[in-house]
Amino acid sequence: MSQLPADSVRSYYKASILGLRALEAKEGLSRRFGPDADARWARFKGKLHDGDRLQVLLRDASAPWGVAFAASHIFLLDGVADDEPFGPSWVVPNGSQARRYLEVAEPPTLTSCAALLGITPTPVQLPELRPTTQLVVAGGAAILAVASAFEGRADLDWARQVTVVADAPAHRQLAGLASVFIGAVKPCEVVVSDLAQLRVGDVAVVSPDAEPACAAALRP
């Protein structure tokens, strides 16, 4: 694995923690955080440290939520199996680093995740959303806008109606985390620009912060 920017890795972990906290609230359980979770880890850990604990939490969440937590999918790591969230070259944070991540204090919201990932909300024009609307989305601000519009709409199906085109790790992870924060049953599809297809009837939603290759892929 080529060396990833340290800032990007830190942002990945911090945003992931907020996603885990959102899952915890959604499930109404205390299996990841809190005194009960700490006690269970203390009984189990043996010679393991908090970096290992963090990886266990992220592996568990990656199984249903994929690119929200799986570093190999977010950073498009080479030579890693599709069902492996990290790969053999991924460096696990040490105990003190992991403790700082686990204590991230930002509120667990999608907007907070976006801020950690360097994405700024901006106004984005959306079409009228109906159960038959098929959206293809590019850009961090566009992901935020579409997620906000879908939240609370029981008549809409996020996983079926939304495809996100993203090459940048921050945009890919935000798309995955949006699935968690809006209460979707499963994640939407996230594809790279090289594989993007604008089909007849698809509506493109592109924000100014979209990567040029992703925006180009959505031009008719």
Image (spheres, grey):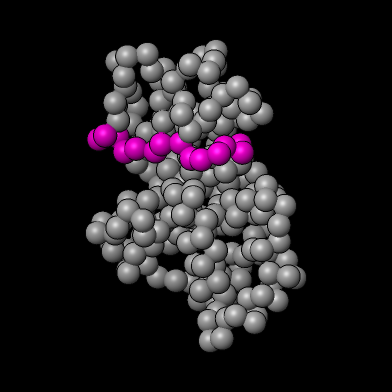
Residue at the bottom extreme, as displayed:
47
Q: Is residue 193 magenta?
A: yes
Q: Nearer the viewer, residue 7 or 177?
A: 177
Res 128 → quadrant:
top right
Q: Residue at x 38, y 43 (%)?
A: 168
Residue 158 in picture, x, y percent from top left = 52, 30
Residue at the right extreme, as displayed:
35
User: Is 101 situated above or below 52?
Assistant: above
Residue 183 in picture, x, y percent from top left = 61, 38
Residue 37 visible, this angle: yes
Quadrant containing the N terminus is bottom left
Q: Residue at x 53, y 22 (%)?
A: 124
Quadrant containing the C terminus is top left
For the image shown, how many numbered marks are present on the structure?
0
User: Is 182 situated above or below 49?
Assistant: above
Q: Residue at x 59, y 51 (%)?
A: 19
Q: Nearer the viewer, residue 216 or 69?
A: 69
Q: Which residues are magenta?
A: 182-195
Residue 10 in picture, x, y percent from top left = 50, 60
Res 32 → quadrant:
bottom right
Residue 170 visible, this angle: no
Q: Residue at x 46, y 26 (%)?
A: 161
Residue 156 in picture, x, y percent from top left = 56, 24
Q: Is residue 21 magenta?
A: no
Left/right of residue 80 with respect to residue 35 in the rendered view: left
